[in-house]
Image (cartoon, coloured by chain):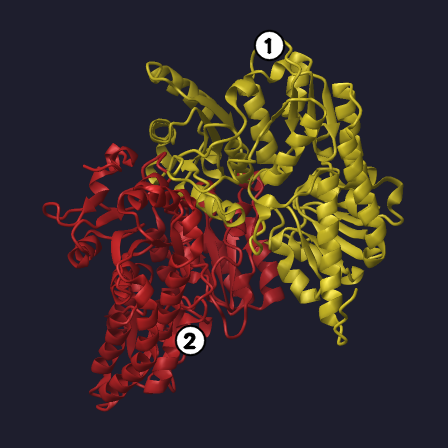
Chain colours: A red, B yellow
Amino acid sequence: MSESAPAIFEERKDQIARVGEGSFALACNRDSLAGAVSQRACVFCGSRVVLYPIADALHLVHGPIGCAAYTWDIRGALSSGPELHRLSFSTDLQELDVIFGGEKKLARSLDELIPLHRPKAAFVYSTCIVGLIGDDLAAVCKAAAERHGIPVIPVQSEGFKGNKREGYAAACKAMATLVGTGDTGGIPRLSVNILGDFNLAGETWIIKDYFDRLGVAVVAGVTGDGRVDDLRRAHGAGLNLVQCSGATMDLAKIMQEKYGTPVIKVSWIGIEDVAESLYAVAEHFKHLDPALPARTAALVRDELAALMPRLKELRRDLEGRKAAVYVGGAFKAFSLIKAFRHLGMQVAIVGSQTGTEEDYRELAAICDPGTIVVDDANPLELSAFLKEKDVDVFVGGVKERPIAHKLGVGFCDHNHERKIALEGFVGMLNFAKEIHASVMSPVWRFVPRREKKEVRP
Amino acid sequence: MSVATTNACKLCTPLGATLAFRGIESAVPFLHGSQGCATYMRRYIISHFREPMDIASSSLGEKHAIHGGGPNLKKGLLNAMQKYGAKVLGVATTCLTETIGDDVARLLTEFRREFADLPLAELVHVSTPSYNGTHMDGFHDAVRAVAEQLCTGRVPAHGGVNLMPGFVSPADIRHLRSLCRAFGLTPLILPDISETLDGPALLDYAPIPSGGTPLTGIRAMSGASASLEFGRCLAGRDTAGTSLRDRFNVPLHSLGLPLGIRETDALVRALEEISGRPAPDKLQQERGRLVDALVDGHKYVSGLKAVVYGEEDLVVGLCAWLSEIGVRPVLAATGARNRHLEDRVLEACGDLLREKPLVREGADFQDIAEEAKALSPDLLVGHSKGYRYAREWNVPLLRVGFPLHDRFGGQRLLHVGYRGAQSLFDSLVNLVLDKRQSDSSVGYGYL
């Protein structure tokens, strides 16, 4: 098939496809292949990333120390107030706890931490081992909630019970116990919840600012700049805007069923997607506020007027270059492909950890012929694809970065740890600057793959 | 001490094992557990070294947790062998597989038998339940497992030395190698991450980075003229060094991590003894330059109070070094337990300590912060995770060890030997000067 074939495991062949080579089909949502160094994480990781930004909750990881240590202050999820989410709490289970059970230690830990930090709620994460030793998390949490008078919510996130998606579901289930318990008085009808955005580098604030300017109230960030009380009254909002659909769609569905809250899928990345998302909100509310579409159009116009000239400058250098995209969820890949087109760049490789069949089919539909589409990739595959397609820049997360850099390929971190806002119109400019800064660096002249090219006759 | 752990000052056991296995040539670290463990550790390690860190996993799911992880372990080993071309597979367990009771030793024996027709990789197995010990236990146990399981026969004496440096930086390992060579000795460094976690840019992605302790060298450790093993807190433990001594009579020199003048002097004396050669002039010069620098800079740091935290042996070494330059370690803390840290710190500092520091084992950062309140330290010495406290207390943090997630070049940080002491001292003095300068309204141009 290609020179990268030796890097591909037989069992994974149908999880990789090339656009334009026959009818498109991609297998996905499988367990990761043992021994293949998957870039995926676990159920716990899925729950932890979704709930992490809730800044006034206590996040207690019930298990041995690793799971808490590796997620300490891990995301650049900013808070405008409390920052309890940036501390790492663990029951740090020891051998005796594993033998005799960890329930007492968990209860005592809650008794110690809740009075000390006075959180609005506590999330108690189950880890692999808790699922095995049979601690009754729900009972311990219930008793602690009664003792302390705050919600203490078990998150059933045993690592081995699937991949990140099951973790998202567990997180949504946990949040759903809060939604509907608060007073919705004073919430205007023209109001939304922002779901699936985590306020990395203040991104939720960028989106919130648009809604402030449009006169649409934001009730809850789920979970960007998240607060327990906001979640409690989130059912009072007129509309749920769901980005990163894998992570929070379950909550939106629960709210739709229980409270009738309508849902719109959005993306805050790129140009068209941001504009379309805002227009969709305007369309939804225009029966309440007929002038909203016009105000939205004006906002988009103003933003674009500021953005486009600067983008044009950057595009001059980037035109015709190639990119690879490997991200957690597929929604981001869609937006990034479109964003790269504004830079005159082609996405030659696209993949995700947890995309669905439908995601991949839709992705393939907007990709250029020859584009490699991959589900649940690993370093061997990614490096082979990078080399084959000779891309200039790779967009991914921390685990992908050394693969790109080792091969002398530029890189843009589009994951939890980013410190630069990449959402909204200003985010598109930041993104373009990031890509430009990486691609245009003179260091590539010295890396082997470019050195070799230059001496070619 | 509190029941819950807040901001841990340790990492989990298998992480240390994966780091040790990364230092073996043609080896793939392999975690028997759920996928998340491998991925989290990779991310954590990559953020420090900025290098690929591929850790294979048996990726256990729910059905495996119930019926046993054996089939996935075997499948994973085969895949890692065939696609990665691993010659050595370092298998570490996790809390999941320890708790479901997978007998990994037996599974590996079965694997060897079932696939006897294939050119099999060497399999090393270490038990690393994360509910027991810290990443340093995982590290040392993995090193011992490598020595015990791969060096099984006596070989003729070859005059080389075995060096088990513990978890030090790639730059440290490079320096230790040249130190040994300066005495005419050929060191076999186990593990050796000097290239595997600090390698060059490449044309092709290396499934396994080049470098690492060669398998042939490991097999020949039994014929070395001596072993050097660093870490005062290893006293009384079974280690790679004691195993080689007990099985093959390889004389063992147990030393402290060579931080500062005196711990390095001890290493130099051991190298003199093993090689029968005096320390070369070049080394004497390095020491002389270091002493000269200490004199030149002593007043900038004299009397400062430092909180030192991190891995037990690093803490001991740092205290030894700080006590030499007139900085008072007022609190020495580690997340590890039962390491006799207090005795080891006192031993290493000797008569240079005017007051005993508070020493805490099993500490998290909340404990450290609570103790530190009454001590009003001028300085923090340790890895990146103390930054939040340095910022809160408005004191400088001298970043050393692992992880350095908020600075560049952690893999090239030199700690050991006279040169390491020099580089740490320069960094410390400059840190103090930087703070003085930025705190002062005058804006002094000479300091």
Do the dots labelled 1 and 2 sit on one chain?
Answer: no
Residue B1 position in % (x across, y down): 70, 52
Q: Chain under label 2?
A: A
Q: Residue at x 21, y 56 (%)?
A: A359
Q: Is residue A296 left or right of residue A208?
A: left
Q: Is residue B198 left or right of residue A255?
A: right
Q: Answer with the quarter of the image where residue A457 lies.
A: top left
Whether residue A131 is visible? no
In the rendered image, the vertical position of residue B249 relative to residue B357, given as above or below: above
Residue A238 position in % (x across, y down): 29, 79
Pick the front one: B283 or A348? B283
Q: Amino acid at mark 1?
A: Arg
Find the distance from the CA under tag 1 to the CA under tag 2: 67 Å
Mark drawn on residue A89:
none
Read off the residue under disc 1: B154
Q: Residue at x 29, y 57 (%)?
A: A321
Residue A385 position in % (x across, y down): 29, 44
Residue A200 position in % (x across, y down): 44, 66
Disc 1 vs disc 2: which is toward the camera? 1
Pick the front one: B101 or A315? A315
Q: Amino acid at mark 2?
A: Trp
Dot 1 crowding, Cα within 10 Å, few <14, some 14–19, many 20+ = some
In the rendered image, the vertical position of residue A160 relative to residue B328, given as above or below: above
Read off the residue under disc 2: A205
